[in-house]
Image (cartoon, rainbow, N blue to C red):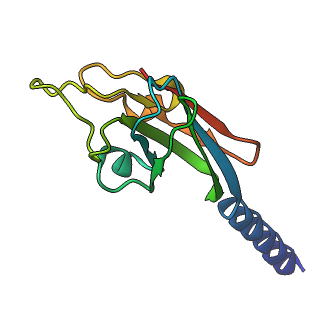
Amino acid sequence: MLNKLVLVLLIFINNFLLAEDNQRTKVTIRIEGLKSNSGNVKVALCNSLENYKDHKAPFKGLILPIKNNTAEVTLYDLPVGFYAVKAFHDQNDNNNLDTNFLGIPIEDYGFSNNAKGIIGPPSWNNAKILINQNSNTIVIKIN
């Protein structure tokens, strides 16, 4: 009898953990404070430190049109977890974050949590946000 009880408990715990891993949600990403409606906004949604650091391989890469100096998208069916967003205003639509001769960006950019970096982008820990079952909106103010 005890063995059956233990087996039932293990099955229950396993099913509970699997349900947690399979939770899905939606998130709205809104980029505010754009100086013009020209070009578009490039967005990288990252779900790990590795793809946050790798500029060419985010979890999801998006190109957003600009309307009224704002760009917005809603993504559905995302796994619950930590995410960070990087965005820049590609004013000349050349698919690059343009920089000056010192490597300092000359196009506006921003990160989730409105995190700021010192000599480079902010850390994953400063930019990451928990996306859970609740209504999620990430607002980034471009600077």
**Residue 104 at x, y = what percent?**
20, 24
Q: Give the mark count.
A: 0
Q: Residue at x 79, y 77 (%)?
A: 7
Specify the farthest residue to the left.
101
Q: Horizontally, is 37 left or right of 5 in the view?
A: left
Observer-nearest residue: 83 or 103? Answer: 103
Observer-nearest residue: 50 or 103? Answer: 103
**Residue 116 at x, y = what percent?**
39, 21
Q: Is residue 46 visible?
A: no
Residue 138 found in image quarter: top right
Compared with 122, 77 (above or below) is below
Observer-nearest residue: 11 or 103? Answer: 103
Q: Is residue 115 visible?
A: yes
Figure quadrant of the N terminus:
bottom right
**Residue 105 at x, y = what percent?**
25, 27
Q: Residue at x 50, y 36 (%)?
A: 128
